[in-house]
Amino acid sequence: MTSMPQREPKFAGQLAIFTTAILWSTAGLTIKLVEWHPLIISASRSLVAVVFLLFLRLISPPPKSAKTPFFPLLTSAFVFSLCMISFVAANRLTTSANAILLQYGAPVWAALLAWLLVKEKPHWEHWGALVLIFAGLLIFFRGALGAGSLLGDGIAVLSGIFLGAHSALLRMIKEGNPRDAFLLAHVITAVIGIPFFFLYPPTIEVTPVMSIVFMGIMQAGLGAVFFSYGIKRVTAVQALLITTVEPVLNPLWVFLATGEKPSAAAFAGGAIIIFAVIASSLIGWHRDERLKLITKTVITKKT
C-alpha cells in the first residue's frame, strides 16, 4: 500500500502524455478538411486554443504556491511557437513523411538539453528506444520518404530541435504551471499569423470552421492540458518518446474515416515504435521500484 502513492504519479504522467499523442494524431485528418493557407490554419487553431486555455485558467486558476520562473516560461513559449510554425513550413517545402521523420529527432534533443539544463541523465533504455523508434519510423514511412528539399528538410530538423527544447524547458518549470507556456506560445502563433488573414483571406464555410474549432480545443487546448500534467511527472526524453506513437495513430483515424488500410510496412513500423515506448517505460518503472525498495531497506536497517 505504501508504494502506490509513489508509483501513481509517474504512471499518471505517462498516461497523460499518451493521451496527448492521441489528441495530436488527429491533426493529419482534420487539417485536410481545411483548405486555407497553413499559417492561417496555425493562427486560427492557436486563437481558439488561447480562448479555451484562458477559460480553463479562469475557472481553475493555478495554486498561488505554483511559482513559474519567467525566463524558462518565456523561452519555452517562443520555442514551441517556432516549432509549430517551422513544422508547417517544413510540410510546405518537403514531403510530409520527411517532415514527420526529421521532426521526431526531438527525443534526442530533449535528452541532451534536459541533461544539460535540468540534470536529467538519459538511461540506456532511452537510447535503445530512440534507435528502435528511428528504425520503426523508417519502416513506417517506407515508400513515402522522398528527396524533398534541403531547405524543407533542414527546417524539419529545426522543428524537432525546438520541440525537444520545449520539453526540456518545461521540466525547468515543473513546480510552476507549464500550461501557461502553451498559452503564451499560442498567443505568439496567433499574432504572427494575423497578417496572413489579409494576404490570403480564407473561405468561411462550416467544415473548415468546425475543423479549426476541433483542433483548437481538442488538439491544441486539451493537448496542452494533458502534456502539462504529464511533463511535471515524467522526464523530458520519456515524454517525447511516448509522443512518437502519434504518427502511428494517424493512419488509424484515416482508416476509420475513409476505410483506407495502412500498409504492412506501417503495421510493422508501428509495432516497433509501440514496443520501444512500452519497453522503455516499463524498464524505467522497474528501476524506480528497485531503487525505492533498496532505499526502504537501508532506512529500515538504520532504524
Image (cartoon, grey):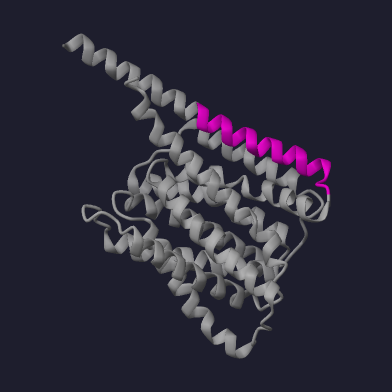
The verdict on residue 281 being magenta is yes
Q: Where is residue 216, by image quadrant? A: bottom right
On screen, residue 40 above or below 274 = below
Residue drawn at point x = 50 percent, y = 73 percent: 47
Residue found at the far top of this picture: 301
Compare residues 95 and 42 and report the one nearer the observer: 42
The secondary structure that most of the magenta stretch takes on is helix
**Range of residues picked out in magenta:** 261-282
- Total labels: the figure holds 0
Residue drawn at point x = 62 percent, y = 45 percent: 245
Q: Position of residue 83 (x, y in %)?
A: 52, 64
Q: Position of residue 156 (x, y in %)?
A: 61, 62
Is 68 placed left or right of 4 in the picture?
A: left
Say if residue 76 shows up in the picture: no
On screen, residue 2 above or below 189 = above
Viewport quadrant of the C terminus: top left
Say if residue 296 shows up in the picture: yes
The verdict on residue 273 being magenta is yes
